[in-house]
Image: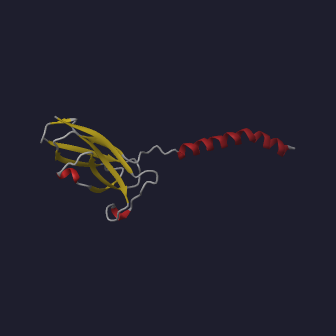
Amino acid sequence: MRLLQFLFRASPATLLLVLCLHLGANKAQENTRRIIIQNFEIPTTANRDEEVTAVLQVKTELKECMVAKVYLTSDVPVEGAFNYKYTRCLCDDYPNTYYWDFHTNRTVQIAAVVDIIRELGICPNDAAVTPISKNRFYTIKTLVVA
């Protein structure tokens, strides 16, 4: 009989412990870290044949490094350095900043694109991850040419 009474006394404490463990497990499963954070800056307006500089800062909140291929694309053809593509290792403790200098005579929509790719020889010891859910990130801005 005493054993049965002991089990009933421990029951609320056991239920509370199980509830706390369950709530803690749910919190631990939440992934609030962002894969890619982009800060894309270009002037909103420019004059014809004026040199324009586009700056893209890319960083991550993941603890693992990734191989990032970064480039610009537009709705109208743009010549020169606009077409440069960069491939670098992206880690959480070191954001990457990219620069493009180019000329355009027309209003253009520009997309800064970051592709997470599988490529050897970029990250140290080839230790890099590839996200399962999404591997392309982009930001679109418009440059109005007067």
From the top left corner, tell me how far across and down residue 36 is, in percent. Answer: 37, 47
34 vs 95, left or right, is right
Figure disc tally: 0
Color style of the picture: secondary structure
Q: Residue furthest right?
A: 1
From the top left corner, tell me how far across and down residue 126 is, in percent. Answer: 36, 64
44 vs 10, left or right, is left
From the top left corner, tell me how far across and down residue 21 is, in percent. Answer: 62, 44
Whether residue 52 is visible here, answered yes or no, is yes
From the top left corner, tell me how far across and down residue 128 is, in percent. Answer: 39, 59
83 vs 116, left or right, is left
Q: Residue furthest left?
A: 49
Q: Residue at x 17, y 47 (%)?
A: 101
The answer to whether residue 101 is above or below residue 127 is above
Q: Nearer the viewer, residue 12 or 102?
A: 102
103 vs 64, left or right, is left
Whether residue 66 is visible here, answered yes or no, is no
Q: Residue 13 sits in which quadrant?
A: top right
Q: Quadrant of the C terminus?
A: top left
Q: Residue at x 42, y 56 (%)?
A: 130
Q: Residue at x 14, y 37 (%)?
A: 47
Q: Nearer the viewer, residue 16 or 97?
A: 97
Q: Residue at x 21, y 39 (%)?
A: 107
